[in-house]
Image (tube, rainbow, N blue to C red):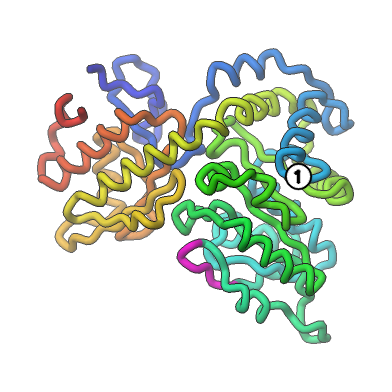
Amino acid sequence: MELVSSNPVANGSLRESKSAPRVVDLRSDTVTRPTDTMRAAMAKADVDDDVLGSDPTADQLQRQVAKLMGKEAGLFVPSGTMGNLISVLVHCEVRGSEVILGSDSHIHVYENGGISTIGHVHPRVVPNKEDGTMDLRKIEASIRPKELLYATTRLICIENTHADCGGRCITAEYTDKLGELAKSYGLKVHVDGARIFNASTALGVPVDRLVSAADSVSVCLSKGLGAPVGSVIVGSQEFIAKAKKLRKTLGGGMRQVGVLCAAGLVALHDMVGRLKDDHHKCRILAEGLNGIDGLHVNLDAVHTNIVFVNITADSIPGAEELCEAMKHEGVLAIPMSHTRFRFVTHHQISEDDIRYTLACFKNHFQGTLLRSPTVSEIA
């Protein structure tokens, strides 16, 4: 069996040769290459100037995502980070506003503090629970009194699936209760739905039902859905009109953007229905890693395509060293701390890739990392 990956990335460089060593890139679901269908759609895309509001492919994508989410309108943006930033700024138009969000949320941890540095919006942080939610009582206690001394609370943000909590899914029932709480105080709700289709698939709940209580949603096309770039934010017509102006201010107006949106349309058509396969492969990987002495996976936390692995053996190197060792075998992961690392499955990871990965880890923990797994070990 030829051990050559369709995703040739290793040691920080692209390897074009057909004889390149096998690479299983599990760093994220953002590492995928556009499919042949996506590339063909991009080449044939009907385009015009989207800044002038006349790109037909962008219009089609925006309408389709808005309809799927049960919202009035949508807007294509270059990234989920920009989508979240725009959404927060639209809801918090007055400088000195405050947003309530989770301590482990992507907006708070991984988006460069943009809501503060660019938007002058103050974050009011509530601890995320292990399941990715925040205690509703703590959220309510964090809403500021309308007094001279305090910033004005205007928005609550949640994330679904919640990446740093292991890709866990936030239920519609929780979001409904959050929406009721927000409405009672005159607040808005934004959902960072970077992997909202993964949540919908895992829960078996229509995606519009998961976000029915939200005033806005940011939907990523380049994570679980495998498009090369872009997100769509959705909300009311008024919300999107304000968002479009902010997108221009932030440099997100991109003229013939239908070339990118065409790949997003293919992603919606081709990829949503097969997310369950990513989840299945992630479960196989999680169970296999959990069976290796020195590693532990909380299997109850593996809901979708993300798995966090904890190193339990004191005698082995930390996660950074382990991930570096695995890189030499062609298995790519991201260390999250000295004792924890992360894998993310996606549509360009096969079950054979999973078996190869497990064989590499078994060899490593048996002290035989210098040899590659045999065909029988992978099978």
Query: Looking at the image, which residue is at 29% across and 54% down?
Result: 319
Q: Picture quarter containing residue 79?
A: top right
Which residue is labeled 1 in the image? 70
Query: Looking at the image, which residue is at 55% across and 45% down?
Result: 204
Instruction: Judge from the rendering whether residue 293 lies leftward or rightward of residue 341; answer left or right.
Output: left
Percent across and percent down for residue 141 are 66, 81
Q: Picture quarter containing residue 95?
A: bottom right
Query: Looking at the image, which residue is at 82% across and 70% down?
Result: 186
Q: Quadrant of the N terminus?
A: top left
| Label 1 crowd bin: few (<14), some (14–19), many (20+), radius 10 Å | some
Instruction: Judge from the rendering whether residue 350 lies leftward or rightward of residue 216; answer left or right.
Output: left
Which secondary structure type mostly characterizes the magenta part of the structure? loop
Please name the amino acid that badge 1 sits on: Gly
Percent across and percent down for residue 258 are 74, 25
Query: Looking at the image, which residue is at 54% across and 16% down?
Result: 36
Q: Magenta segment range?
A: 126-131
Q: Quadrant of the C terminus?
A: top left
Q: Secondary structure at mark 1?
A: loop
